[in-house]
Image (cartoon, rainbow, N blue to C red):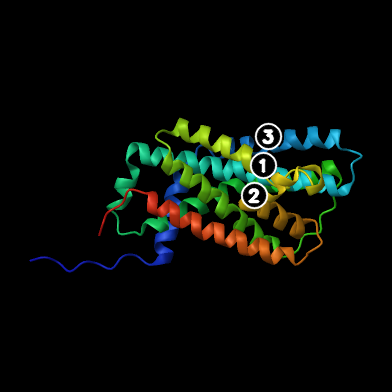
Amino acid sequence: MLLPPRNPPSFLAQLIDLTLMQLSNFRWSWRRMAITGMLVPTANIVMLGLFNRDSGIDTLSYILVGNIVISLMFESMGKVSSNFAFMRWVGTFNYFATLPIQRYMLVIATLLAFALLALPALIFIIFFGAWFLAVPLHANPLVFLIIPLTMIPLSSLGAWLGTLAMTPDESNAMTLVVTFFLLCLGPVLLPPDRIPDILHWVGRLSPATYAASALRQTLIGPITPQLGWDIAMLTFFAISMTWLVSKRMEWRNN
C-alpha cells in the first residue's frame, strides 16, 4: 500500500536548512573569502584616491561607492557563479532535486548564504574607504534595504552565469568579463560627466548602475526621487534574474 505523499517543508524551514547547508560548505574558507573581497576594492580606493585627491567630494564619493559595488561583485556575484557552476558540473542539482524543496528556494538560500559571507568585506570597504577618501557618511535607514536589494540581482546574475558555464573555470572567466563591463557601463566608478554619453545611456541596462546610485544616496546623501526608480529597477532585476536561474537549473519535472 502506497503511503500518501508528505507535505513539503514550509518556506522558512526550506530557507533555513538550505542556507545552513550552503554556509557549512564554506565554513573553512570564509576567512579567505573575506580577505580576497577586501583586496581589490582596497587597492582601487588607494590608487584612485591618490590620483583624484583634489577632484572634489563628488568624484571621491563615486570612487567609494563604485568600490563597494566591486566588493559585492567579487564576493557575491563571483562566488555564487563559481558555486552554481560547480554544482552543475558535479551533479549536485540532481541531488537537491530529490529533496522535497522548490528549486527557487535553493537559489534564494544560496544568495542569502553568500550575502552573509560577503558582509565582513563590505563593512570594511565602507568604513575604510570613507576614512581614506575623507568622504563623510550620512547613512539613511533605507541603506539596510538597499544593501540586500543590491546583493540579490548581482548574485543572481552570477548564479545565472554559473548555470551557463560548462566548468567552474569557465564560470570564473565569464564572471570576470561581465564584472569589467558592468563597471564600465554607466556612472559606477566615475561621475556621469567623466564618461562618454553612450556608456551613460547603455549603463541604464546594468544593475550595477542602479546599485551604485542607490548606495550613494543612502550612504552619503542626499536622497532624491531617483532612489525610487533605483529601488524599482533593482527589484525588477532581482526577480527576473532569480526566475531565469531557477529555469536554467536541472530539476525534476513533477
Quarter of the rendering occupied by the N terminus: bottom left
Among the 4 quarters of the image, the one containing residue 182: top right
Q: Give the answer, above or below, for where 73 lies relative to 243.
A: above
Specify the label residue 40 is tagged with: 3
Horizontal side of 11 relative to 250 (left or right) equals: right
Quarter of the rendering occupied by the C terminus: bottom left
Q: Report the number of discs.
A: 3
Q: Disc 2 or disc 3, which is closer to the eye? A: 2
Horizontal side of 247 relative to 152 (left or right) equals: left
Closest to the observer: 204 or 7? 204
Q: Disc 3 or disc 1, which is closer to the eye? A: 1
* Residue at the image point whose x is 84% and y is 42% from the top: 133
Disc 2, disc 3: CB below 8 Å? no
Query: Which element is circle 1 on?
Result: helix
Residue, far left:
1
* Residue at the image point whose x is 34% and y is 46% from the top: 93
Query: Which element is circle 3 on?
Result: helix
Q: How far separated are the C-alphas under marks 3 and 1?
A: 13 Å
The residue under label 1 is 183
Q: Position of residue 188 (x, y in %)?
A: 72, 46
Amino acid at pointer 3: Val
Amino acid at pointer 2: Ala
Disc 1, disc 2: CB below 8 Å? yes
